[in-house]
Amino acid sequence: DDAPAATKFAGDYLQVYQRLKHHLDPMEFEWWRYAAYAVMTVALLLSYRFLSIRNQNESLESRTALRLLVGISLAALLFAFVGVLVGLRFVEPAQMLGLTWRVKLLKFYPFRLYDLILPAVLAIVLTRVLIVWLTNSEQDSLNLKRQSYLNFSLTISLFVVGITLPFGDRNSSRMPTQMRQDWLAACHWIEQNTAEDALIVTPRHSWAFKWFAQRAEYVSYKDCPQESAGILEWNRRLTYKYNWSVESYTDEIIDEQDLARLAQETQAEYLIATDTGTVSVDPIFVNSSYRIFSLK
């Protein structure tokens, strides 16, 4: 990225404190996420302590591997803790002391490593705890029966969790059924009735538009460039589209002049709008959730 220093900083700032703030700004994390990872960290340390005491007969290689896993987790924890200190603030981001170096450091995703490693290592260690506990239990008939019930319950529980956890991801659009069907219909119409190089102005929530419509968008909140100049242009387009919507609805109606102004600024050929708001121009496509207007 050969952009000027001011452009690089502006792009980094937008990335850290706007587009990816839910990943990079520790002040944006909900309290329960901190609590959940604190509980998992304590569980990991207690489990490691349990194995250190109860598993003295384990081979040196196994004990070394376990120590290495826990050590990596603690190193990732230290990295995340430093990230929290770097991002800690009691004012708005733009008012922080040392903003430039803070933004540069937070760009390195200091929390991602711990976010991934802790659950994985904890699962491995807890599995080992269960194995050691079952192995060291007295092998009388009552214990064997109890262990059988426990194994069965754990197996069923893991099966149920494995089925139910991804359930919310089956509708990645997070749209109600009818709206999702309407959106797909609008995308299909765009694919079938517009030129391959057509540029489309889409709503803010334009889920998988490029995939289903096979056309370019003027701007998409999810599709943020990585280079500084691209991030600034992305932000400019988002700001313009928002301001155009506000200004156009000031008189509670979008007319031909508003659409002409949008076409001139964006150089787009079509506008997809939701079914809310009054537009004086007839759409070329309409369903219960979306309307498509020609800007040509």
Image (cartoon, rainbow, N blue to C red):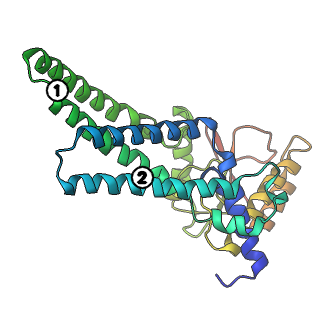
Q: How many marks?
A: 2
Residue 27 in the image: state x and y as whole percent.
Answer: 69, 47
Is residue 190 rendered to the left or right of residue 146? right
Q: Position of residue 56 (x, y in %)?
A: 21, 44
Q: Residue furthest bottom?
A: 2
Q: Circle 1 sits on which residue?
A: 137
Which element type, helix, strand or loop, lies under badge 1? loop
- Which residue appears at 9% of the width and 23% of the height? 139
Please name the amino acid that badge 1 sits on. Answer: Ser
At label 2, the amino acid type is: Ile
Could one spot residue 166 in this view of the protein?
Answer: no
- Give the residue at mark 2: 117
Rendered-image quadrant of the C terminus:
bottom right
Name which residue lies at 51% across and 53% down. Answer: 77
Secondary element at tag 2: helix
Q: For marks 1 and 2, give the CA distance.
A: 30 Å
